[in-house]
Amino acid sequence: MSTGASVEPSAAPPSSQQDIAPPPTVLPGASHPPARGAQLMTLARGAALCVLPLILLAFSPKEIVDDAYISYRHAWNLLHGHGLVYNAVERVEGFTNLLWTLISAVPLALGIRVDLFCSILGGTLAATAVLRSWRFLVRLGVSEHAAWGAALLVALFPGYYVNAVNGLEAGLFSLLLVETAGAVLTRRQPLVPALLGGLLFTTRPESAALLPLCVIFRFLADRARSDDLRWIKQDVLRMALGWGAIIGAVTAWRLLFYGHPLPNSVAAKAVNLTNVPELLWNARFGAIYLRGFFLTNPLLVVLSVLGLITAPRALWAWLGGLTAIGAALLILLQGGDWMLHFRLLTMYAPFMMFPAAAGLGFLGGRLQRMKANLRPVAGIALAAAASFGLYVGASQLHFFPNMQWELGQPAKAYEIIARALRGGLQQGDVVAGEGIGMLGIELPETYVHDFLGLTDEHLAHHGTLRDIYGRRDYVYTARQVRPAVYIVHSGFFHLSRFRAGFEGDFNATYESYDVLRPQGATTHQMMVSLRSDVAERLRPLLGSMQPERATIPLPE
């Protein structure tokens, strides 16, 4: 069987519970090493896939994104008897990663630093996803060389691991995605992919779109193993019903507890399909996002495309390729994301190993079939192309000259401000923040208003302005919510729009201060606005932040 082939038929009866996979193939001309030598080589390669990410992370900037703390606040409220909510007084699902949020409750319950725990766990799961993808490829009959080469492409992908340690669910999603695909293609028991697919849905709800795709590929994989059409239909139906039952149960729980079938955070970023200008804007910035991802790992993308072209009958390659294509189309629809390192696509990297391995298998076969005197030249050309691709990808990320393991916290300013104000805030005070993750975890007893709509039900469903950050309505926040405190990191950008939407004189009602300005900075960044009735109480608490009084202008 060639590396472009699908799953071969098996002599085992359909009722057999064993995993069916053809024997691994090797490139033409390659020799079979002794069994012990092969085992040692496998262990060495597996160790390399674990060590290489650690080396990359040691020299890469690592940080916990502010959105991770939104999940942690939901988990904190769950442990304190309020349920999975951001603000204790209202039922709003402000996260998209249900399973990850539940996992984050474990370190909180044990008194362990939650962001560090989730960062280490995310990185570990991400590395495991690469290992499992590599082994699945070998079990599916892919050449050891091609499978190992595809694994190296991801093991040397710094953006993939930087995203995995940012405190969010990327590593868990990658591992569940690979395990689900492997179960769909190789396992006899239909409930295994059903359970894994259900867990995948609880990690990110958009993965529900994989169900019909996996049903098709399960059917095709079964057809390659058996001619018993009745058994095939039963097998596929059991998988689909089990997977769908989990999706249905989670959705029913959302409806009963939150009143909506999808997370509030999804609704806040949902696209209006009838708004053509918005769709065109999203497509433009989505294309920019895709281009940026391509530059981070051009080899992975090019080899994946090559694999789909050259291995049209390889089910495993097409399942990975179509999943990645679906993710890219979703990016074009919604316009991308604000987080660094293209996290909405990098978490699919281990699954893109499937079509990339097909591409590598094709190149390896071509190289072996060349005349002996041309092989060195072709090998040098391929090595040069690979080196250039790795260089282009590495150039997209700043590396430290020395190893640094410290986790950065871009939301550190919110932590400082929240801790300063915590002693002066009273019950009934509403704090509105541009970044609500760290702010919320530091002010667990305070109502925090998210004017970008991720944790605000009204804004998510009725907000008038939508972008990659969420959905907002400056008039609603300024007039109806009327926060006691605004805390933003974008200078005048949002505050000027709150002034425009405010009924009355904003600068007379709020005292605004520029705080924590870096030495030498000439632009406003961190701003705190205090409503006049709380200013006397809270103003002294800003004293250590070198506050400078500012007048909020109207938007330009």
Image (cartoon, rainbow, N blue to C red):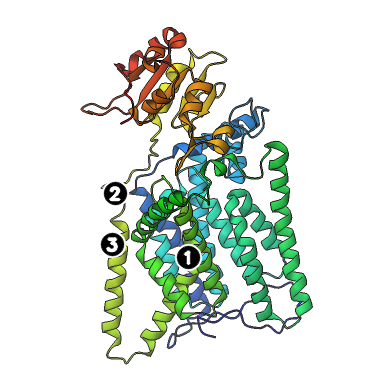
Q: CA distance from mark 2 to mark 3?
A: 12 Å
The amino acid type of the residue labelled 1 equals Met
| Mark sitting on residue 391 | 3
Q: How many marks?
A: 3
Using residue 349 as the reference point, say whether residue 511 is left or right of it. Answer: left
Q: Are marks 1 and 3 in contact (CB under 8 Å)?
A: no
Name of the residue lying farthest toward the left: 520
Q: Residues within 10 Å of mark 3 (few under 14, many from 20)?
A: some
Above or below: residue 52 compared with residue 426:
below
Please tell me whether mark 2 sits on a helix, a strand or a loop. Answer: loop
Above or below: residue 207 compared with residue 34:
above
Residue pointed to by mark 2: 398
Residue 400: percent from left, percent from top: 28, 47
Q: CA distance from mark 1 to mark 2?
A: 24 Å
Q: Residues within 10 Å of mark 1 (few under 14, many from 20)?
A: many
Taking the spot 48% from the left edge, 56% from the top edge, the residue there is: 127
Taking the spot 60% from the left edge, 50% from the top edge, the residue there is: 205
Of residues 82 and 292, the one drawn nearer to the viewer in this rendering: 292
Residue 423: percent from left, percent from top: 48, 13
Name of the residue lying farthest toward the bottom: 371
Q: Quadrant of residue 89?
A: top right
Mark 1 or mark 2: whose residue is earlier in sequence: 1
Residue 141: percent from left, percent from top: 55, 78
Mark 1 or mark 3: whose residue is earlier in sequence: 1
Q: Is residue 201 visible?
A: yes
